[in-house]
Amino acid sequence: MSDDQYKARMQRKKQHIDSRIEEANIDKGIIVLLTGNGKGKSSSALGMICRALGYGMKIAVAKFLKGVQDTGEDVFLAKQPNVRTVFMKTGFTWDTQDKEYDTAMAVETWTKAQAYLEDKSIDLVVLDELTYMISYQYLEEKMIINSLNNRPKHQHVVITGRAASESLIEIADTVSEIKDIKHAFRANIKAQKGVDL
């Protein structure tokens, strides 16, 4: 490709992108759904938290499933004055093996998450691993969808977890599926601080 062809191609691309930016004139809170079997859903949500913190926004995080696992992001978030957090007290469901207890803890955590979704002062709510609460039937999906639909107009929500339901996919404005191609754990490499924890 010659320099002139390259320049013409980039000019066309710029015109297209500029016109799409101009057409995007709706300002509202969005729902971002990060699903799929690959690594990086919660990490992506943390990236959005950092972005929001950079703008001085107020954030709330409800972590389902991983509540008793210490991670670097939990240490980081605990130091942030603009971040509120609630953790489900069970850890991973395969550790407890007690559906009644897990359900009670999910409901307890959801009650706090629901309060975040009603709070007009919170700009971004992260519902980490929420998809499992639906697929394991710990929480009623209609109740969750209702809360998402009735949240403050400009509040953003990030939902993470594998096997997102069709209802969550339908309600979300942005859906990304993280594909699993290769993972160190399958090669017997334990979870690493700063990467996995």
Image (cartoon, grey):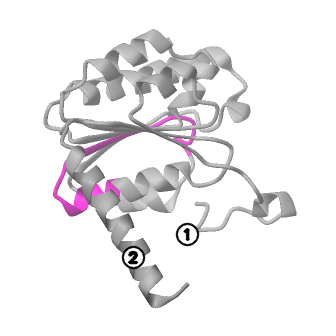
Q: Which residue is mark 1?
A: 194
Picture residue at 52% right of the left edge, 57% below the top? 71
Residue 12 circle label: none
Which of the 4 image quadrants contains residue 114? top left
Picture residue at 39% right of the left edge, 76% below the top? 8
Q: Residues within 10 Å of mark 2 (few under 14, many from 20)?
A: few
Position of 158 with respect to 182 (left or right) is left
Identify which residue, 149 or 95, lies in the foreground.
149
Could you tell me residue 177's position as x and y percent?
59, 43
Range of the magenta residues? 49-68
Which of the 4 image quadrants contains residue 50? bottom left
Q: Residues within 10 Å of mark 1 (few under 14, many from 20)?
A: few
Identify which residue, 54 or 97, lies in the foreground.
54
Q: Amino acid at mark 2?
A: Ala
Could you tell me residue 192's position as x and y percent?
65, 67
- Identify the image quadrant of the C terminus: bottom right
Q: Which tag, 1 or 2, sits closer to the chain's start? A: 2
Picture residue at 69% right of the left edge, 62% below the top? 191
- Seen in the picture, residue 78 relative to 167 is either above or below; the reply is below
Q: Which residue is mark 2?
A: 8
Q: Amino acid at mark 1?
A: Gly
**Helix, strand or loop at mark 2:** helix
Work out how far the residue at label 1 is from the one at label 2, CA to CA, in angstroms. 44 Å
Residue 61 on the magenta segment? yes
Picture residue at 20% right of the left edge, 51% below the top? 22
